[in-house]
Image (cartoon, rainbow, N blue to C red):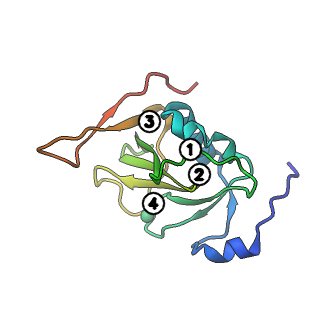
């Protein structure tokens, strides 16, 4: 596929990336698509930003979190002042429970963060299997304010 992606040097200089910007892997693109399709209406508004998006490893701990660099002319997604636009959970192929956060800034996707929820994933771990993914809903609790309850999303990916 001969589509050339041009990195703007001035933009690239701002990024403290551990790795060079590169196109998304298939797994990363599929994970993002799943999040756009199964999250709330807000993440869906960012779906078109997958076009020509680039990524760079943004953390050296071994997690698969990536910095996202969208194309310059993208349609901005919904920006409600909240950086997190998607909050998900899933299991890696090794059965580790991980949380996945999708971040935006000023209507542009900025980061896909994958973190261990059960402490089992240490060092290098992978992206979650799409079949194990669920959407996390924040449930405010007076006794346990940081508590999150995952609910299974109705549609599973084809
Ligand atoms: Zn990390």
**Element class at badge 4:** loop
| 94 relative to 147 in the view: left or right | right
Instruction: Report, in whole angstroms, how far the alpha carbon at label 3 lies from the one at label 4.
Output: 17 Å
- Per the rendering, the mark at residue 107 is 2
Q: Position of residue 145 (x, y in %)?
A: 19, 47
Instruction: Report, in whole angstroms, how far the alpha carbon at label 2 lies from the one at label 1.
Output: 6 Å
Instruction: Report, in whole angstroms, how far the alpha carbon at label 4 lies from the one at label 2.
Output: 25 Å
- Per the rendering, the mark at residue 63 is 4
Residue positioned most to the right = 2
Task: Determine contact: label 1, label 4, CB under 8 Å.
Answer: no
Instruction: Say which label, 1 or 4, has the lower sequence index.
Output: 4
Q: Is mark 4 within 8 Å of ligand 1?
A: yes
Q: Residues within 10 Å of mark 3 (few under 14, many from 20)?
A: many
Q: Position of residue 56 (x, y in %)?
A: 61, 64
Task: Determine contact: label 3, label 2, CB under 8 Å.
Answer: no
- Residue to which mark 3 is pinned: 133
Task: Determine contact: label 2, label 1, CB under 8 Å.
Answer: yes
Can you see residue 136? yes
Q: Position of residue 48 (x, y in %)?
A: 69, 42
Task: Determine contact: label 3, label 1, CB under 8 Å.
Answer: no
**Element class at badge 1:** loop
| 146 relative to 5 in the view: left or right | left
Instruction: Report, in whole angstroms, how far the alpha carbon at label 3 lies from the one at label 2.
Output: 24 Å
Instruction: Say which label, 3 or 2, has the lower sequence index.
Output: 2
Q: Residues within 10 Å of mark 1 (few under 14, many from 20)?
A: some
Q: Residues within 10 Å of mark 2 (few under 14, many from 20)?
A: many
**Element class at badge 3:** loop
- Residue to which mark 1 is pinned: 78
Can you see residue 35? no
Identify the image quadrant of the C terminus. top right
In terms of image quadrants, where is residue 55? bottom right
Q: Which of these two is toward me, 131 or 141? A: 141
């Amino acid at each position: 596929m001969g589509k050339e992606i041009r990195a703007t040097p001035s933009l690239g200089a701002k990024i403290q990336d551990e790795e060079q910007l590169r196109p998304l892997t298939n797994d990363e693109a599929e994970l993002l698509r799943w999040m756009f399709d199964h999250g709330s209406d807000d993440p869906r508004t960012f779906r078109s930003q997958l076009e020509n998006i680039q990524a760079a490893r943004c953390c050296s701990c071994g997690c698969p979190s990536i910095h996202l660099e969208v194309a310059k002319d993208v349609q901005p997604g919904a920006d409600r002042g909240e950086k997190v636009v998607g909050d998900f959970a899933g299991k890696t192929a090794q059965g580790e429970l991980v949380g996945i956060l999708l971040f935006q800034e000023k209507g542009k996707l900025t980061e896909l963060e994958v973190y261990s929820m059960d402490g089992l994933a240490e060092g290098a771990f992978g992206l979650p299997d799409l079949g194990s993914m669920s959407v996390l809903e924040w449930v405010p609790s007076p006794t346990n304010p940081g508590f999150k309850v995952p609910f299974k999303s109705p549609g599973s990916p084809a």
